Image: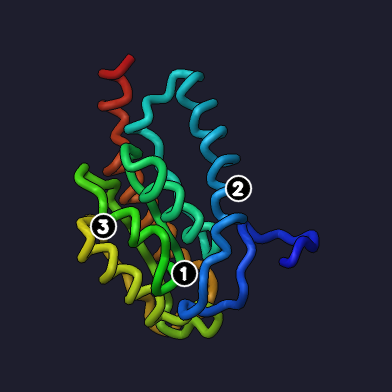
């Protein structure tokens, strides 16, 4: 943050859903991740068979990448993640006319770093803008992953990317 070395996806002014986004660092990372998606496509993976997602900031990054730049992906997952109230994602979706990637979202009710209400608000806003979104709530789960959450995610991934569809695309 502020140019210091860190292990975050993009810079934030603070951990809050009620502040401006650091759009320069978000867009810079979106370009780097777009290069990875393009590499996968060059290697023969159909774009509609690519899922992106992550935990915490990784989920936020995935929502930016998919809903602003890659609306033809297979889907997005966001675990303990949120978008800011005036996110550029929302602005992009207000202009959208196409079918959007489905969102699989999970959040713990005891999360004290990324409040459950922020994830819930993100889900509601994305739904209002045309995203088919599910929110799986985990009582008493803090800012962490659980086995049940990962099992639900695995089930969703297998549903989104069935093996049979991959074989018919070859």
19 vs 42: above or below: below
> Mark 1 or 2 closer to N-term?
2
Q: Which residue is mark 2?
A: 28
Q: Is residue 82 left or right of residue 126?
A: right
Q: Residue furthest right?
A: 4
Provide the secondary structure element on which disc 2 rests: helix
The residue under the point 42% across, 77% down is 108
> Mark 3 or 2 closer to N-term?
2
Label 1 – label 2 distance at C-alpha? 23 Å
Q: Residues within 10 Å of mark 3 (few under 14, many from 20)?
A: few
Q: Residues within 10 Å of mark 2 (few under 14, many from 20)?
A: few
Relative depth, front residue between 37 and 147: 37
Label 3 – label 2 distance at C-alpha? 22 Å
> Answer yes or no: do the residues labelled 1 and 2 have beta carbons within 8 Å?
no
Q: Is residue 19 left or right of residue 154?
A: right
> Mark 3 or 1 closer to N-term?
1
Provide the secondary structure element on which disc 1 rests: loop
Provide the secondary structure element on which disc 3 rests: helix
Q: Residues within 10 Å of mark 1 (few under 14, many from 20)?
A: many
Checking the image for residue 94, the label placed there is: 3
Residue 111, given in percent of the width and then of the height, sits at 49, 81
Residue 83, given in percent of the width and then of the height, sits at 43, 67
Nearest to the eye among marks 3 and 1: give it.
3
Nearest to the eye among marks 1 and 2: give it.
2
The residue under the point 52% across, 61% down is 55
Checking the image for residue 80, the label placed there is: 1
Specify the quadrant that holds the C terminus.
Answer: top left
Relative depth, front residue between 53 and 21: 21
Residue 22, given in percent of the width and then of the height, sits at 58, 64
Relative depth, front residue between 58 and 136: 58
């Amino acid at each position: 943050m502020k140019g210091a070395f860190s292990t975050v996806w993009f810079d934030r002014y603070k951990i809050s859903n009620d502040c401006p986004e650091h759009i320069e660092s978000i867009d810079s990372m979106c370009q780097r991740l777009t290069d990875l998606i393009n590499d996968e496509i060059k290697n023969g993976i159909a774009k509609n068979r690519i899922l992106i997602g992550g935990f915490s900031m990784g989920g936020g990054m995935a929502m930016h990448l998919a809903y602003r730049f890659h609306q033809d992906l297979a889907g997005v997952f966001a675990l303990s993640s949120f978008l800011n109230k005036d996110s550029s994602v929302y602005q992009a979706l207000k202009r959208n006319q196409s079918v959007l990637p489905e969102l699989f979202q999970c959040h713990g009710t005891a999360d004290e770093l990324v409040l459950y209400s922020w994830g819930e608000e993100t889900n509601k806003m994305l739904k209002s803008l045309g995203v088919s979104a599910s929110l799986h709530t985990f009582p008493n789960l803090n800012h962490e992953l659980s086995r049940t959450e990962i099992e639900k995610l695995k089930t969703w991934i297998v549903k989104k990317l069935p093996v049979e569809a991959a074989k018919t695309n070859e």
